[in-house]
Image (cartoon, rainbow, N blue to C red):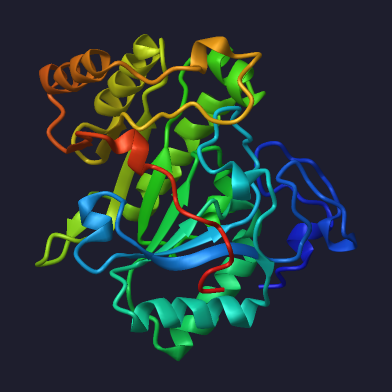
Amino acid sequence: MNWKKWYRECVLCPRECGVDRLSGRRGFCGQTASLKVARAALHMWEEPCISGTRGSGTVFFTGCHLGCVFCQNGQISRGGAGKEISILRLAEIFMELQQKGAHNINLVTPTHFVPQIVEALRISRKMGLCIPIVYNTGGFEKVDTLELLDGWVDVYLTDFKFMDIHLSRRYAHEEGYSFYAAKALEEMFRQTGKPVFDEDGMMKKGIIVRHMVLPGQSMDSRKIIDYLYETYGNQVYISLMNQYTPSGSLEKYPELDQKVKTKVYERLVQYMIRKGVENAFVQEGQTAEESFIPDFDGEGV
């Protein structure tokens, strides 16, 4: 693959900026064509079938093409924390994580660097990389970009953040989020099919759809649960998250300056059960306090 051609007039994400990132210009994601990674380390706080007992080999890429106003990881999505590295160095990082015992390689917010990631995966497979690849995304994806990953990605760990176009316009400046998230999920399912697990209960292939409940938006959460179950049944896993924590500047969004009430979350869990959802992950306890990743300081890069 000639990865550079994808950056001359970048349309990797649905925003289709058309920016020449090779020349040093920055797209909506805030990044040029220089591959930038904020952190690479074993991570224990994903879903159990991803983190397991040894941890998921997470690689956090700098920048984000969605830009939610309530982002929990603003240090790297908007703050620019990270180091510029080569494709070869990324392949080496994958190998180092495998050698540390990672159950998988977990690519976090990777969309705007997909062509280089594919090249790094090609190199690392020749080096002996043999653990599953997890594509950890906000769900705002183009099918054309996902098609580049066919045969490289084993597990899609994707968000479905909003169904209501008014919510996605207000909180992510994008009315088309649910349209693209649904189309992306179709392509992900085409690539992976039904979930497959190894003898230790680790997901080897399949899809987990995350939805983080927002304050005051439980009806939208119900619409997303309805859509996922009515479209895919129990062929995908739903991860219903209660970890929303107010962060950043929310003066213009006072309704978000609070946590989700426990009773609201519990009612949504019961709603899933009544709906017939069997394959799901739910959160308990103080997950809001545990949701942040400490210090994006280039660890492991």
Q: Residue at x 19, y 19 (%)?
A: 266
Number of callouts: 0
Residue 261 versus residue 207 in the image, above or below: above
Residue 163 locus on image (x, y percent) = 46, 19
Viewer-closest of 34 and 199:
34
Name the residue furthest right. Answer: 23
Residue 136 locus on image (x, y percent) = 44, 51
Residue 87 versus residue 29 in the image, above or below: below
Residue 204 visible to an observer of this rendering: no
Residue 228 visible to an observer of this rendering: yes
In the rendered view of the protein, which quadrant contains the N terminus?
Answer: bottom right
Viewer-closest of 115 and 161:
161
Residue 88 versus residue 158 in the image, above or below: below
Q: Residue at x 33, y 68 (%)?
A: 104
Quarter-of-image position of residue 203: bottom left
Residue 30 locus on image (x, y percent) = 75, 47
In the rendered view of the protein, which quadrant contains the C terminus?
Answer: bottom right
Viewer-closest of 145 and 87:
87
Quarter-of-image position of residue 66: top right
Viewer-closest of 219 and 100:
100
Residue 264 versus residue 23 in the image, above or below: above
Relative to residue 195, is residue 16 drawn left or right?
right
Q: Residue at x 59, y 43 (%)?
A: 142
Residue 41 locus on image (x, y percent) = 43, 68
